[in-house]
Image: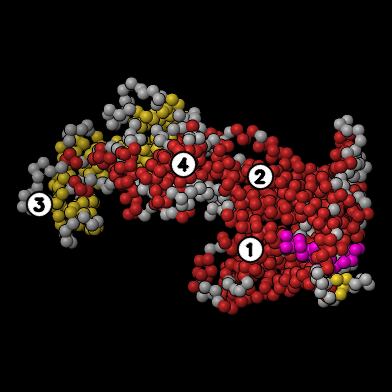
């Protein structure tokens, strides 16, 4: 139906822009990861695998990567645990107030990330709201130190940020389940709990996978929360990258780490997509 | 559809409590921020005392902040224009055209959404570094515009699925050419998606840090200005500006929702 | 389950036990009254069709029996026990849904065995009963397929097997054939009927298609705007419709409006003897009961005769439907065996006994 000219007009401009501003930069990233930095702080374009060797040789990089993955995993689990029942309530119980509750879930997403992370900082600090409240209620005598500048604070904050990201795809998946399937299950003798595990949950798995992927991948690459709240024990892989592009001036090494992260994220997305297809019955 | 009472029973007892707890968790920081923006003794400390508007007064006198707000607005509007200009055709292309590398293109466009922002940011900074382009608001604009194309593409693509192809066919049948059909039929039908995408892009750009981090020159955007101050220590002024940001976001999303429900359910007057 | 020794109440099929007793069921959605005071008995082993237009409340009634809706008032008893107080998953009732509602993530086999697995029956028994059920609906070859891969008619059979395998006391069918094309539909009507005979349990079938209801049912319950218009066997409801609505909804009819005075019924220029009380009257006269007078034998002595001019002729295959206009302006439909095109004036007759007195069907608020 659409003419050649039409199709070219809608394809070419975005293709060109994306090629220049996305493809080329990522390609540059690839190149940089094979270059090196000279002692006089300039980038030399000599091809070498040294950066990658460095990654595996020096412990801190792998350690931080694994710590980041562990933090991301916890955020993913908590987001799902908090988010799934919420999505379920929204889809099956909210009735006339469904729209209102949906908006309530989305609103925090529209409020600045920085602002929310900063808010947790004021809540969790030793002079913060939580500690002074606990002391005010005489539940504790001294401020709890672990609340801030720890992996705990990072996981808490990131769970707060990414729970709505988990809720939305799960909600979408639950909404897609035809209600007559729930009635059919009940008709055939299944109690509400049985209906949930045998019918509703299996059909919601693609949504769960999508939400889990968002929460994990976005947490993995986060650099703000650890910087604000993580303290020395809460440093994540992105912080290392940032410092390599800042004070520690080693662009090639930073590029190498970034590329690894990119590959990791892309493989996770690929895996998630495959699993979602397997569990999708439409 | 609601499940009749007889089909569900025992689960419903703990579920409402869970919902309340989770909403409480989601809104606790926001509420704290707002309450403490009026707290005379600054951040922290419980209970809040000395209600005051001092922090807001300080905020309004703070020139640097307002300059950064202006910069952010300029960036957001320009980025919005770029994202829509390239995102809408991209969505159309994915919907209606076949070309080599289409699958790759689709993934590439969506990548900045899920990839950590800093990777997109530093890749772009490498590009500018190697092409000897100085970092400035322009580079930030280019960064936001590119990264947020995916938002426009996703929203518009979803809107295209709901678009009745027959309307465009009817337009062509009645004598309009492709260009006319595009402006008279396609775009009006996508109005809702485009506005939604625009709003989302604007909001995301105003809040953007990760990509901007590597692309700023001399002029700060609002998030980066706040960020700079945070490094120097917490001031309650931040609470005040945060409250303002929250209220404006709230207004934006509520009006967006109103707009959308009115468009989808036009009121019938009898 | 204890069998009652009480005599059967209000069941058209004498000698059959009463299975389900629906008493004074009423249901409103908001301000709309969907069902008003429905009372009905369903006998064991009978095929009952609830027939009605869309909006008549037939699906709501079915869903109340299944347990997906709660009535506002009234009760339902199954073999003496209150059925309406039980949730759907505890009723010995199963449903075949309008769009089949097969579980897309389970195979055909797993779908059919679902109710048995939920009841935690031993694996061997489940396997045996599933095999039996699949054979009964002739879908054994598709046991391992997924619902998404089989046709609508095949899905419908699986939905049936899935319901019947649980050996319910009552099977509810919510317009299960409406999504099938005409030929497949006719074939399934026959198969469903013989299946019901074979299995021997009560079927409650909901449809808007009056022909379907006639073909399949032991009894038909005609529902109009939330009330039962008439409950009778297909033959009875066809030959002796109780109301004008019934006469018109089921098959074609001519409605003759007139008056009875001194034992004579008069409708326009037609008149005949009746043993009915005086007053205004409405008669239903089926088109096939109006005959063209055989010129050789002449008209029947007891018949009512008149002349009519053919206005319109509709070809229906084996029969034709003629529209004739009488001298006084009365328009009647006449059904005859097909001949070549007829012309002009006809001499027509009908027996007085074929004019059935019916009640008016008033609008309901």
Residue at the spot 36% in from the left edge and 55% down from the top edge: C181
Disc 1: host chain: B
Q: Is residue B52 visible?
A: no
The mark lying in front, picked from 2 and 4, is 4
Whether C36 is drawn above or below A43: the answer is above
Secondary structure category for the residue under label 1: helix
Give, as a single range, the part of the protein colored magenta: A246-264
Report, in whole angstroms, how far the alpha carbon at label 4 lies from the one at label 1.
44 Å
Residue C223, how many percent across, how many down? 37, 39
Task: Examine the image and state in which quarter residue B197 appears.
Answer: bottom right
Instruction: Give B191 or C84, whichever is nearer the viewer.
Output: C84
Residue C55, how many percent across, how many down? 43, 43
Instruction: Tell me if mark 4 has few (under 14), some (14-19) or many (20+) residues whose alpha carbon lies within 10 angstroms of its own.
Output: many
Q: Which residue is mark 2?
A: A84
Same chain for labels 1 and 3? Say yes or no: no
Q: Is residue C345 visible?
A: yes
Task: Examine the image and state in which quarter residue A88 appears.
Answer: top right
Report, in whole angstroms, how far the alpha carbon at label 2 lies from the one at label 4.
29 Å
Magenta-colored stretch includes residue B122: no
Report, in whole angstroms, how far the alpha carbon at label 2 lies from the one at label 3.
79 Å
Q: Which residue is mark 4?
A: C113
Magenta-colored stretch includes residue A260: yes
Q: Which mark is residue B156?
A: 1
The mark lying in front, picked from 2 and 3, is 2
Disc 2: host chain: A
The mark lying in front, picked from 4 and 1, is 4
Instruction: Give B207 or A174, whichever is nearer the viewer.
Output: A174
């Amino acid at each position: 139906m659409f003419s050649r000219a039409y199709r070219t007009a809608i394809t070419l401009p975005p293709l060109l822009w994306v090629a220049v501003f996305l493809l080329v930069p990522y390609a540059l990233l690839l190149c940089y990861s094979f270059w090196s930095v000279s002692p006089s702080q300039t980038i030399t374009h000599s091809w070498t695998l040294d950066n990658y060797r460095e990654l595996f040789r020096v412990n801190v990089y792998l350690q931080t990567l694994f710590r980041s993955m562990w933090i991301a995993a916890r955020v993913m689990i908590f987001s799902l645990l908090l988010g799934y029942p919420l999505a379920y309530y929204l889809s099956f119980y909210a009735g006339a107030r469904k729209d209102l509750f949906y908006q309530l879930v989305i609103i925090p997403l529209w409020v600045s990330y920085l602002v929310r992370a900063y808010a947790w900082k004021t809540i969790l600090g030793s002079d913060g709201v939580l500690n002074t409240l606990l002391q005010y209620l005489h539940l504790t005598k001294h401020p709890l130190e672990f609340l801030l500048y720890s992996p705990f604070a990072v996981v808490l904050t990131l769970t707060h940020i990414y729970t709505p990201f988990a809720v939305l795809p799960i909600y979408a998946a639950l909404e897609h389940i035809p209600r007559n399937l729930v009635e059919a299950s009940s008709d055939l003798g299944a109690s509400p709990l049985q209906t949930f595990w045998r019918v509703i949950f299996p059909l919601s798995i693609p949504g769960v996978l999508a939400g889990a992927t968002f929460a994990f991948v976005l947490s993995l690459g986060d650099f703000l929360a650890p910087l604000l709240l993580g303290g020395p024990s809460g440093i994540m892989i992105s912080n290392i990258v940032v410092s390599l592009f800042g004070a520690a001036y080693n662009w090639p090494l930073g590029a190498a780490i970034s590329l690894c992260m990119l590959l990791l994220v892309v493989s996770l997305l690929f895996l998630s997509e495959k699993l979602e297809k397997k569990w999708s019955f439409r | 559809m609601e499940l009749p009472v007889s089909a569900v029973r025992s689960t419903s007892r703990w579920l409402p409590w869970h919902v309340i707890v989770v909403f409480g968790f989601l809104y606790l920081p926001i509420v704290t921020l707002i309450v403490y923006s009026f707290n005379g003794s600054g951040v922290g400390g419980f209970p809040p005392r000395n209600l005051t508007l001092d922090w807001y007064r300080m905020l309004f006198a703070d020139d640097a902040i307002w300059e950064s707000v202006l910069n952010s607005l300029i960036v957001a509007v320009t980025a919005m224009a770029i994202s829509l200009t390239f995102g809408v055709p991209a969505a159309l292309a994915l919907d209606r055209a076949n070309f080599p590398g289409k699958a790759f293109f689709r993934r590439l466009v969506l990548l900045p959404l899920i990839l950590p922002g800093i990777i997109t940011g530093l890749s772009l900074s490498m590009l500018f570094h190697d092409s000897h382009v100085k970092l400035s608001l322009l580079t930030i604009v280019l960064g936001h515009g590119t990264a947020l194309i995916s938002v426009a593409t996703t929203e518009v693509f979803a809107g295209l699925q709901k678009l009745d192809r027959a309307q465009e066919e009817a337009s062509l049948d009645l004598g309009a050419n492709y260009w006319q059909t595009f402006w008279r039929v396609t775009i009006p039908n996508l109005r809702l998606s485009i506005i939604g995408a625009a709003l989302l892009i604007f909001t995301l750009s105003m809040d953007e840090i990760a990509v901007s981090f590597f692309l700023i020159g001399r002029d700060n955007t609002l998030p980066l200005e706040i960020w700079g101050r945070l490094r120097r220590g917490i001031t309650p002024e931040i609470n005040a500006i945060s409250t303002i940001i929250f209220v404006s976001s709230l207004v934006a999303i509520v009006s967006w929702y109103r707009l959308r429900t009115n468009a989808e359910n036009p009121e019938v007057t009898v | 389950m204890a069998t009652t020794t009480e005599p059967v109440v209000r069941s058209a099929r004498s000698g059959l036990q009463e299975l389900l007793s629906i008493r004074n069921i009423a249901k409103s959605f908001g301000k709309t009254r969907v069902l008003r005071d429905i009372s009905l008995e369903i006998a064991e082993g009978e095929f009952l069709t609830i027939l009605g237009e869309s909006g008549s409340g037939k699906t709501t009634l079915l869903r109340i029996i299944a347990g997906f809706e709660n009535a506002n008032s009234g009760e339902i008893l199954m073999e003496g026990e209150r059925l309406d107080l039980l949730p759907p998953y505890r009723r010995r009732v199963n449903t075949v849904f309008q769009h089949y509602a097969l579980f897309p993530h389970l195979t055909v086999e797993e779908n059919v065995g679902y109710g048995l697995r939920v009841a935690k029956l031993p694996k061997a028994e489940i396997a045996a009963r599933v095999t039996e059920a699949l054979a009964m609906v002739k879908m054994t070859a598709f046991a391992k397929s997924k619902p998404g891969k089989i046709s609508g008619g095949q899905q419908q059979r699986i939905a049936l097997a899935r319901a019947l395998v649980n050996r319910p006391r009552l099977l509810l069918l919510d317009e299960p054939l409406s999504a099938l094309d005409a030929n497949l539909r006719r074939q399934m009507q026959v198969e469903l009927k013989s299946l019901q005979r074979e299995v021997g349990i009560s079927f409650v079938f909901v449809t808007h298609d009056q022909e379907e209801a006639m073909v399949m049912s032991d009894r038909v319950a005609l529902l109009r705007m939330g009330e039962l218009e008439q409950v009778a066997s297909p033959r009875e409801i066809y030959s002796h419709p109780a109301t004008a609505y019934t006469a018109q909804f089921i098959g074609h009819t001519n409605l003759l409006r007139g008056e009875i005075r001194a034992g004579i019924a008069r409708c326009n220029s037609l008149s005949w003897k009746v043993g009915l009380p005086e007053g205004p009257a409405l008669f239903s006269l089926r088109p096939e009961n109006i005959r063209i007078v055989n010129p050789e034998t002449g008209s029947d002595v007891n018949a009512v005769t008149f002349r009519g001019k053919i206005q319109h002729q509709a070809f229906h295959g084996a029969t034709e439907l003629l529209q004739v206009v009488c001298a006084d302006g009365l328009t009647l439909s006449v059904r005859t065996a097909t001949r070549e095109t007829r012309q002009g004036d006809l001499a027509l007759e009908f027996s007085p006994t074929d004019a059935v007195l019916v009640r008016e069907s008033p609008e309901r608020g």
